[in-house]
Amino acid sequence: GTAPGVSREQQIRRLLAIVEPGFRITRGSPLPFGATYVRTGVNFSVFSRHATAVILVLFEPGDPEPALELPLDPLRHRT
């Protein structure tokens, strides 16, 4: 979802202002659980036997508003 009063376009512009060139989302590793620094960036791994959806929410340090809310695709983001 998008924060109230913030358009999807504004959210995308904000994200693009903080990511580095070459930013991409790729298939990760199932272990270890949590956020782990890897050579190519950060791997996020969660487990839930009964979840119907997972949204990765990223924040900039000190900012209470999310920089990005990324709904994970249950087929693409599954390892």
Image (spheres, rainbow, N blue to C red):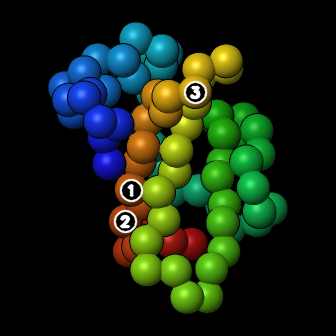
* Left or right side of 71 for 35: right
Compared to residue 58, the image places residue 31 above or below, namely below
Q: Secondary structure at mark 3?
A: loop
Q: Amino acid at mark 3?
A: Pro
Mark 2 residue crowding within 10 angstroms, few (<14) / some (14–19) / many (20+): few
Total numbered circles = 3
User: For the residues carrying marks 3 and 2, which lies nearer the camera in this image?
Assistant: 3
Q: Residue at x 42, y 43 (%)?
A: 69
Q: Amino acid at mark 1?
A: Pro
Q: Residue at x 58, y 27 (%)?
A: 64
* Left or right side of 31 for 18: left
Q: Residue at x 34, y 37 (%)?
A: 3
Q: Secondary structure at mark 1?
A: strand
Instruction: Compare marks 1 and 3 and give the one earlier in the sequence.
Output: 3
Residue 64's disc is: 3
For the residue pair 7 and 70, the one nearer the viewer reads as: 7
Whole-angstrom CA distance, mark 1 to mark 3, is 19 Å
Mark 1 residue crowding within 10 angstroms, few (<14) / some (14–19) / many (20+): few
Residue 73's disc is: 2
User: For the residues carrying marks 1 and 3, which lies nearer the camera in this image?
Assistant: 3
Rendering coords of residue 15 (x, y %): 39, 23
Instruction: Compare marks 3 and 2 and give the one earlier in the sequence.
Output: 3
Which residue is denoted by mark 1 in the rendering?
Answer: 71
Rendering coords of residue 30 (x, y %): 68, 67
For the residue pair 53 and 27, the one nearer the viewer reads as: 53
Whether pointer 2 and pointer 1 mark residues with C-beta atoms closer than 8 Å, the reply is yes
